[in-house]
Amino acid sequence: MRETDGAPTGPASQQGMRRANLALVLGVIARAPRSRAEVAAGTGLTRAAVSSLAEELIGAGLVVEEGPAAPSGKVGRPGTALGLNPDGPGGLGAEIGVEHLGACVVDLRGEVRAWHRQEIRNRGRSPAAVMADLAELVRRAAAEAGPRPAGLALAVPGLVGIDGALLQRAANLDWEEVPLVAELRLALRAAGAGELAELPLRADNEANLGGLAELWLGGGPPHFLHVSAEAGIGSAIVVEGRLLRGARGFAGELGHVPVHPDGPRCACGAHGCLEQYAGESAVLRAAGLEGIRGDWVALLAERAEAGDEEVRQALAGAGAALGIASAGAVNLLDPAEVVLGGGYAQLAPWLLPAMRAELAARVTVRPWADERLTVSRLGRRGPLLGAAAGVVRSVLADPGRLRA
Amino acid sequence: MRETDGAPTGPASQQGMRRANLALVLGVIARAPRSRAEVAAGTGLTRAAVSSLAEELIGAGLVVEEGPAAPSGKVGRPGTALGLNPDGPGGLGAEIGVEHLGACVVDLRGEVRAWHRQEIRNRGRSPAAVMADLAELVRRAAAEAGPRPAGLALAVPGLVGIDGALLQRAANLDWEEVPLVAELRLALRAAGAGELAELPLRADNEANLGGLAELWLGGGPPHFLHVSAEAGIGSAIVVEGRLLRGARGFAGELGHVPVHPDGPRCACGAHGCLEQYAGESAVLRAAGLEGIRGDWVALLAERAEAGDEEVRQALAGAGAALGIASAGAVNLLDPAEVVLGGGYAQLAPWLLPAMRAELAARVTVRPWADERLTVSRLGRRGPLLGAAAGVVRSVLADPGRLRA
């Protein structure tokens, strides 16, 4: 009695079944090392089928024999445990921030094997110049880490089309219609990293990747709204364990939800957007710190910690605006949680009280509790982690694709 | 390189394949009558497999032989066309409104075979009393129509849990925590319709069902926001052709998105909700028609049509508030369209100009065009049609379930 996506679009086939079963077996092994017998028991496949599928996964470098499996309490000799290969294909992540660049490698087990961050003012620089610096950072991260990457994903502070290739607009970089993937490919070749330029490449909005990192690594529930800040405000909407991207890939622009419709004019042209109350410039202005340079989040956290009343007031005002916008989003989306991430995670102690008060006052047609507003433990590492982890996830979800 | 739902949870099986292929064949036939050869060509299945699957679908009463298929231009005798059985299992829909009840039957082909609507003031009546009237209406609709129903779905103006059984709250009926499915089952038995009480029963929010009707019957795109009004304001968020229900089933409460956070107090306890500017009471108050009885939508449309300036101003005000709330939703969700449905469809000529102006002024970080705001042609028939059509869709999506 539930609506569905409609009828399937092709016949089920033996080949499709084997590919699905490869993913099934790999998925069980990814949760914890398991003997072949345990994999068979956990999947419902025969032991013969599991052995054959495991052989293929080992051949592809995805799985390794780890020595004897933990004793299961059953009689008989324990089988050899199969585990993910830490030196199998990994994920390469890259990040363009308004004030930094980043590159990292995550292995199949989710361990960070290389992590580079460089503070650099990118606002107003040309995409080509920024990409040249980024490519060098990516090259170094890839060279340093053991696993050869299966793909490269790039986080950017702007609207990326659903194809993952074209940047529509990044207001805080002053970039418009930039072919990100093509530019990055060119820059990698110029940096002497031609083999990285041949990888599957994909770009995504940093807030999307931050939300996905929270889902995959941060223990987020299957339905949540992730609200984050770098220079601008972004959000990621996760529904049934998947990111909501919208018709064109531009979903999640919580920063431009009207909070006070007659409020100050925003850089986007509208009036009273959330960014006018809780964005970097607005908070610094309210705190009397307009025009400062450097890490605004660290600066505000330090001053608030030290008891600076003007800063605390500014953060409380931002929290109230975040609460109003989030309340509208909760009424619309019914998430299980609202997660404060990115730069906001570090500022949470001073944002949360006002934000909680607004949510409690405005989410009233359904049950809501203060505990549903949580703070990400990934914070500002989220987008870069999410980029690399997404590559690994796509390998685990369809290992058959690597060989195809 | 795209995130996925993760690994599959069970092995693919022969039985699962046959069930999937039954749905595949039925889906092709549902789009238009087809010969067995055409079905084979369209699905990639062998003719022998199609014949066997078609036999099973005919045996289940879902498919009938329709006579010769249309000439395809190919040499040879055309095969017999297979079509959906108009007297096969249909969908039974029921609706509880604040001021009406409804019941209808839709057949496998989507034709309405029975349609009953009764004007009755339900506000403040007990669930049991309302269900008794509704059961009688449902019994009559089912008795009148040819197809035996495969299930019954109920539309209600309130928050329904994700299990489709329990009403959390219907503010405009003054109901809380009503076990809708259990109550309707009881009422059907008491009305002498015991066989209907045995059907799969499911309840849903009327705005959700209105949105699904738009998706299935109204030609809505795969991503849209459907905004509708009866006594309250509801919305349905459709993403990739599926309804977004949220963690607990309470998504879509656009009526309680804050429009002017310091505005008048809403019945929900919050301040400045959209309902305080565009809900029935608010618009009637602004039009100087507070307290009138009867069909408020028809009355406002009639007066606006006749040139009543106060009514036109009231509707323009409602349109502006709808535009502000919708702009926030568009920035958050990136739908391909915003569709004005339910009672708003009839009031669209006077709502649209102000609504379009607000959307244009506030959806600026991405392309937006006036034409993306459209009007439903289903209007207030949506929720009841959606209820019945959902039952039919679930039969078409998994015909194997009927026999299981």
Image: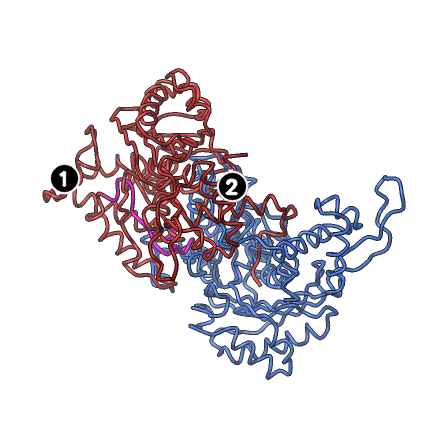
Chain colours: A red, B blue
Residue A140 seen in this snapshot: yes
- Residue A65: numbered disc: none
Residue B7's x, y, as percent?
47, 48
- Span shown in magenta: A328-345
The disc labelled 2 sits on which kind of residue? Ala
Give the position of the N terminus of chain A as an image quadrant: bottom right
Q: Is residue A336 magenta?
A: yes
Q: Quadrant of residue A61?
A: top left
Horizontal arrangement in the rendering, residue A236 relative to residue A24 (left or right): left
The answer to whether mark 2 and mark 1 are in CB contact below 8 A is: no
As rendered, which of A389 and A163 lies closer to the eye?
Answer: A389
Q: Tell me the chain of label 1.
A: A
Mark 2 residue element: loop
In the rendered structure, the residue with mark 2 lies on which chain?
Answer: A
- The answer to which quarter of the image holds residue B90 is bottom right
Q: Is B240 covered by the magenta stretch? A: no
Residue A202 falls left or right of residue A67? right
Please state the horizontal and vertical placement of residue B177, each as a whole percent of the image.
43, 73
Residue named by callout 1:
A302
- Residue drawn at (50%, 77%) of the image: B127
Q: Amino acid at mark 1?
A: Glu
**SS of the residue at dot 1?**
helix
Q: Which mark is residue A247?
A: 2
Could you say which is closer to the camera, residue A121 or residue A360? A121
Disc on the earlier residue, 2 or 1: 2
| Residue A271 in sight from this viewpoint | no
